[in-house]
Image (cartoon, rainbow, N blue to C red):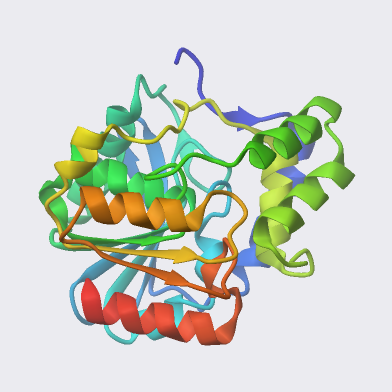
């Protein structure tokens, strides 16, 4: 990669951060806000709570820390929670150097943990954030205590063809209407009344990411993961075959705790009953 991500123009940047501030207003007031300088740029981190071991939250693609608004309060009752805006994507993190490969993405996050003085980190990732958690466990596991994956994409199963077909159509026509349909379809529910969902749309329309392509790790790489692992999949997720993803992960990581929430879509914590179960499983199994 010889380029870095950036906003399309100043007007797009202004529109995006208006949406960002509205979405972040749904989160509790953080106890600390950090802009962590690393070799690849500045990573925005929000700290919540002050008890227990550190837990870091990695959002889905373009979702930022705002996507965890409903999960942060109960998790922060038991842990010091660090919500991270993924470097290289839209958000308050600012990329300053290109990522050569996926190892660079792991080293960038490891730099953040080092600068914050964190070790034994419980790493929780949703969607693409789950892929990042796995990438970290493969390439830079030294500061990790465990990983929890919430319908992680391209870890043990590829995207469905519909993801590429719908996403390509929206990208080619650069249509707000098509992108709105794509986000609603991928969520399995009409979530566009939620500020966090509108923020994802703003990121799609306003920001141009330049990061290494996200692909499934090789079998030997997945088998190399040694940290305790929890993986939950949505039974109604449309972005991949959840049953196949769960079965393959179980076969490659026999020590992992793998489960399917039968009535959940890709965004596992949309339904309160699924959210409560996720919190219980995360706190019980990997925290």
Q: Is residue 94 above or below residue 20?
A: above
Q: Is residue 22 above or below residue 5?
A: below
Rendered location of residue 210, percent (x, y): 53, 25
Rendered location of residue 184, percent (x, y): 75, 58
Rendered location of residue 212, percent (x, y): 44, 25
Q: In the displayed structure, does residue 152 sit left or right of residue 141? A: right
Q: How many marks?
A: 0
Q: Which quadrant, please, contains the C terminus? A: bottom left
The furthest residue to the top:
2
- Mark yes or no: residue 286 visible: yes
To which quarter of the image does residue 76 belong?
bottom left
Residue nearest the observer in this picture, 69 or 272: 272
Residue at position x 33%, y 71% in the image? 81
Q: Is residue 264 above or below residue 10?
A: below
- Mark yes or no: residue 18 visible: no
Residue nearest the observer in this picture, 72 or 231: 231
Rendered location of residue 6, percent (x, y): 60, 30
């Amino acid at each position: 990669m010889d380029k870095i991500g950036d906003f399309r123009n100043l007007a797009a940047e202004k529109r995006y951060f208006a949406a960002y501030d509205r979405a972040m207003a749904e989160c509790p007031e953080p106890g600390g806000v950090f802009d962590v300088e690393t070799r690849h740029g500045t990573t925005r981190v929000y700290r919540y709570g002050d008890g227990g071991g550190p837990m870091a939250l990695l959002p889905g693609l373009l979702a930022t820390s705002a996507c965890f608004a409903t999960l942060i309060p109960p998790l922060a009752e038991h842990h010091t929670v660090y919500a991270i805006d993924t470097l290289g994507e839209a958000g308050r993190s600012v990329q300053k150097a290109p990522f050569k490969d996926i190892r660079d993405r792991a080293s960038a996050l490891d730099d953040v943990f080092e600068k914050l003085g964190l070790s034994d980190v419980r790493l929780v990732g949703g969607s693409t954030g789950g892929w990042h958690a796995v990438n970290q466990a493969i390439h830079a596991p030294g500061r990790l205590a465990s990983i929890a994956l919430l319908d992680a994409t391209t870890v043990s199963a590829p995207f469905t063809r519909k993801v590429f077909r719908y996403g390509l159509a929206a990208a080619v026509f650069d249509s707000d209407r098509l992108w709105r349909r794509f986000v609603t379809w991928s969520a399995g529910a009409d979530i566009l009344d939620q500020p966090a969902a509108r923020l994802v749309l703003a990121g799609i329309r306003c920001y141009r990411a330049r990061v290494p392509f996200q692909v499934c790790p090789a079998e030997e790489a997945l088998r190399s993961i040694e940290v305790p692992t929890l993986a939950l999949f949505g039974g109604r997720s449309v972005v991949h075959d959840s049953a196949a993803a769960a079965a393959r992960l179980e076969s490659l990581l026999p020590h992992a705790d793998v489960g399917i929430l039968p009535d959940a879509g890709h965004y596992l914590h949309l339904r309160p009953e699924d959210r409560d179960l996720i919190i219980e499983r995360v706190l019980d199994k990997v925290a």
